[in-house]
Image: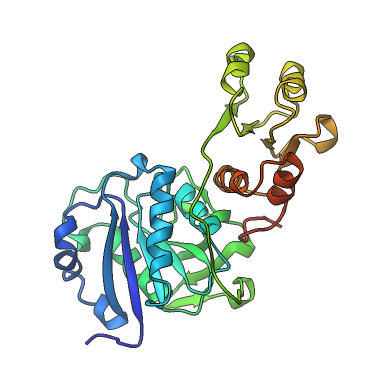
Amino acid sequence: MVNHNKKICLLICSSVPGLQKDKLNDWLSQMPEIKIIAEIEPVFVFGKNSVEITPETWIKLASEINQRLDKFSGFVVIHGADNLLYTSSAISFLLQNLIKPIVFTGSQLVQQSSQDPKKFGIRANLINAIQVATFNLTEVCLMLGNRLLRANQSERIIEESLNIFNAPANSVLGRIDFSIRVFDKVVAQNKGKVRFFNQLDSNIEIINIMPTLDLKSLTKRIADKAGVIVNSGDYHRLPEDLIFLFEKITRDIPVVIWSKSIKTEVLGPKNILIINNMTWEATVVKLMWALTQARNVKKVKELMADNIAQEIIY
């Protein structure tokens, strides 16, 4: 029996064992319980391993969803664990002010040897994700394991467990016990029209602070970049020569320092912005989005500081 009250779009955005582009419905037929939850329409977006995903794929995925917003009650995206946080964070910036749920799911297993969806982790996750997609949510979220998480505030957990992603308490949107419980008090309530953006600027330089950082080659690399983002790791200060480079060479482009330890007052150049209240993945894709909205350093800094898509961690 099919639940005709809800229609869910299932977007394939990663390779899945046993799943072929021309046999999506055959693959879904192995999980008949899905039809009880909702009517499912599969859409093939990307068929390679998720490590191969690029910003162009993010834009394609956002476009596929945007074209179908009026037709479906919710959206489920099958995606590998690798790059999942980048993709889901990107979707939260490309599709803003959502009025329907976009639920990312997949398998917790790194190696999936079976072609039977009943025998690997994707089955339970997919069923739960489809059920969540029928709810009245306005979030881009992750449904893996027994927790529903806000995607652009989530982080990968290194150790293998039922839950391979984690998020701050206020971004745990729900939990699975005997059923799915959604915590309404922490779920965003959007109204109005969805805003779709079809551009991201990937012309950025990503710098990881380490003793082997070559400032001479860095100076050449950033000459034609639209922006710079620095992962300072556990450093409490930046090298003085690097600060000098930012002040003299890159003063006309925004420089984002992602850090949990460096204080704003330590840095002088006005083009530098310290980010300590977002995940790394959200910071990267937010800068790529912000650079399509403005080139003025001050305006880009303002956009990076604003809570655009529930990405700011309070």
The image shows residue 143 at horizontal and vertical percentages of: 43, 63
State the residue in front, 188 or 107.
Answer: 188
Tally the numbered discs. 0
**Is 89 left or right of 269, judged from the image as shown?**
left
Residue positioned most to the top: 216
Q: Is residue 145 visible?
A: no
The image shows residue 209 at horizontal and vertical percentages of: 63, 24
- Quarter of the image for the C terminus: give it: bottom right
**Is 160 left or right of 47, judged from the image as shown?**
right
The image shows residue 234 at horizontal and vertical percentages of: 66, 31
State the residue in front, 124 or 43.
Answer: 43
- Quarter of the image for the N terminus: give it: bottom left
**Is 78 left or right of 149, judged from the image as shown?**
left
Q: Residue at x 57, y 31 (%)?
A: 206
Q: Residue at x 52, y 53 (%)?
A: 89
The image shows residue 140 at horizontal and vertical percentages of: 50, 63
Q: Note whether 6 is above or below 168 in the view shown.
A: below
State the residue in front, 21 or 312.
Answer: 21
Q: Note whether 282 is above or below 213 in the view shown.
A: below
Q: Which quarter of the figure has residue 243?
A: top right
Q: Residue at x 38, y 70 (%)?
A: 68
State the residue in front, 200 or 119.
Answer: 200
